[in-house]
Image (cartoon, grey):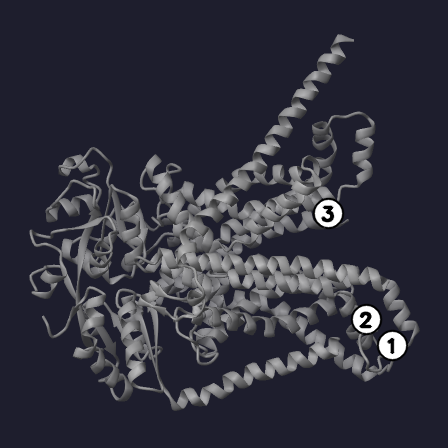
Amino acid sequence: MKIISAIHYMIFTAVLLSGSGWSQPVNAASQKLVLTGASTIAPLATEIGRRFESQHSGTRIDVQTGGSARGINDARNGTADIGMVSRPLKPQEQDLQAHTIAWDGVGIILHASNPVAALSRQQIADIYTGKIDNWKTVGGRDAPIAVVNKAEGRSTLELFLAYFQLKNSDIRPHVIIGDNAQGIKTVVGNPNAVGYVSIGAAEYEAGHGVPIKLLPLDGIAATVANVRNGTFPLSRPLNLVTRAPPEGLSREFIDFTRSKQVYDLVEAQYFVPVSVR
Amino acid sequence: MPETVSVKSAGVHRDRFAQLTVCIAAFLVCAAFVWILSDLVRGGMAHLSWNFLFDAPRDAGRAGGIGPILVSTVLVLLVALTVALPLGWMTAALLAEYVSADGTFGSAARYSLQMLAAVPSIVFGLFGNAFFSIYLGMGFSILSGGLTLACMLLPILVSTGEAGLRAVPDAYRLSAAALGMSRKATLLHLLLPAAAPSLAAGLLLGIGRAIAETAALLFTSGYVDRMPGSLLDSGRTLAIHIFDLSMNVSGGDASAHASALVLITALLLINIAAIRLTAGWQRRKIVSE
Amino acid sequence: MIWSRHNISSPSASADARMLWLLRGAAGTATALVLLIFLFLLVESWPALRHISIGRFLIDPSWNPGESMYKLTPMLSGTLYAAGGALLLATPLGIASALFIAYYASPRSASIYTRVVELLAGIPSVVYGFWGLTTLVPLINQLHPPGASLLAGILVLTLMILPTIALTAHAALFSVPPDYLRSAAALGISRWGMIRGVALPAAKTGIAAGIILAAGRAIGETMAVLMVTGNVVQHAASLFDPIRTLAANIALEMPYATGDHRAALFVSGLTLMLLVMMLWSLAAPLGRNRDA
């Protein structure tokens, strides 16, 4: 029996190896793009990639989530063909080429039952640095504020800090979250929480009956419409970055992501297509 | 006389109290189990269907099914077992049959394998990322995920295999030697088949551990929720899918519940198979003896 | 017991020798693996160990890799609090479960209960985490916000390590020679007296080894803890404070980390591995005593 199973085993291994060996040349013949980076862009890039593949047979678009820092890093050292970065490039990143595929904003979110309707810039900064720790101080009910902050390396965090001129080490968080959905989930689970997430993700959820609300920032409502017309102050480009000017398949894909053919996909994720703005 | 009575009744009270405590503890554990299970069933049952099992995920997993994810899970598992099974059972055979338990090599091997069993899965993930994905250049792929899992499974396979081989009575070895069988033939045709129940139990234990694994695969097999075209493609396993849906996809709860239900059902079936298998083997063994 | 149609009695010294070398090769690979893992963790954490003095992992003001601050101690304390709390809850529950199976339950309910415990052991950590996130955290939040807290981590970890303790304790109780128990019964000792005076002392080392095994698992657990503890880097002042464990830190920041930050995460991994190995070297002599 052992011999029989050994033969089975060998056949099986051979099939497995030849399987991978056989599909490798197919893969080399077909073309594959690897995208890594911002988790805000990843769902959109996946959807666009799927449509791109269906129109260009023999191509494969692999999307790996990480963060914007990872997108920069992978595009730079060639681990990925294209990096996804959900913020403008920094001065020290000008060696890379950025291609904006959509716009998004970062909005402050509260639980829908929270009576607070607006917070000033100073109030938000004070809440995040722990100077205000009760909703009563800003005209809400008498309850402790649960501050939701983002983990290190997320561009949402960087944009938020830059806008409110804060340092991450000054922030006194009660919960640290990774991705937008986790932030929304945390605020839904805690009526006294305050967080900041991608407006796209927040409007998507709110539109699906999730009890959260977006606060206006400097008096401007945090809506996709205001991101679209450019009045919302804390908006950001969603970028694809490459090491060199894109060629071949990369170029084709990037052009595709910026074309009208994918506007419905961009809008389905509650982002703003490029040329509309 | 009255003294003994009171001591005895105190003893009876203590006995009752202990029984009560133990039963309450057991009840608590059962209640927690039922709680978890009923939550998952309630949340996932409505979303579960045949289409869910075979369709590709759409809209980042909010809609559609888990077809490609099941395929990736099975592929990662196959890669892991293809590598870990021969390596693990050969090591077990050497440790049980060829080297003395107290010898230098025997104790060194056992020591390092026990240490390997103690390594947390996230550390395996770090290692797999640094070694397989980057150093060996496999990138985020089913191959590097499977190899990382193989490292994790090795200690389980070795220890169950070794225990099984050691449990084979020495009479087998003596009779084989008396018949003039080579040690190789003895091992392949007599000892390994005799240890089969234990080997199978170890195998199923390993499969159970492998399909439940998340942390080790996070940085090795990656997130891509597509049908893998080859072993060098990234593939998302079921456990990572649940993690991603619940943490990273707003509105993914129903799918996450359903996926968790599928995962637990698979583990349940493996568990039942393990029990059936060992019971069947034992019966056959008794009959043949 | 003849399993093959092939001729099995063909002694051949060279085949035997080849076989032995093959086995040695396999065993050598398996043995070297742990060294390889160690080596790679060291190589990857080397940049951090070189750029950042070890002391800074202890005395930096906070963990903010973006601002080059790399304090690991709050995460170390978080790991130990969560694992310690889970052990405090799971040890009595686990031993009670083992006693229930071994001495209190009818054979039928014992087998059902054993199955329940085995199934609990089989539930993947990510499912525990998911359940904790959707059920436990909102519940704790009603009690004392923010919900995602040390307590949630402890409760989820308790459920996860309880089966380990229960199953090893049951195995240890099972291997207590039945003569001991029969003699105790013959002396007219009550059931609890027998358990406390005879069974538990005889199974002591086995139970202890199981507890240490469970501690190792609690310290290394990543996904479930990551999902429910809130992940704030701080020393917890109460059960309701959020914490971050070493393992969760790796999973949370690894996808975003580059350069020294990434190397510092490998230092977290190295610390974790050393911690677990230390525990294991405590448990190993216990296991040997039991065998002897």
Q: Which of marks 1 and 3 is in front?
A: 1
Q: Are marks 2 and 1 in contact (CB under 8 Å)?
A: yes
Residue B61 placement, left or right of B102: left
Q: Which circle marks residue B67 in the picture? A: none
Q: Are marks 2 and 3 on the same chain?
A: no
The quarter in which the N terminus of chain C is drawn is bottom right
Q: Mark 3 points at which residue?
A: C289
Q: Give the residue drawn at x 55%, y 59%.
A: B267
Q: Mark 2 points at which residue?
A: B190
Q: Nearer the viewer, mark 2 or mark 1?
A: 2
Work out how far the residue at label 2 is from the one at label 1, CA to CA, in angstroms. Answer: 10 Å
Residue found at the far top of this picture:
B2
Q: Name the residue under label 1.
A: B181
Q: Which of C144 and A127 is in front in this view?
A: C144
Look at label 3 and name its amino acid. Asn
Work out how far the residue at label 2 is from the one at label 3, CA to CA, in angstroms. Answer: 32 Å
What is the x, y in percent for residue A236?
16, 65
What is the x, y in percent for residue B124?
50, 64
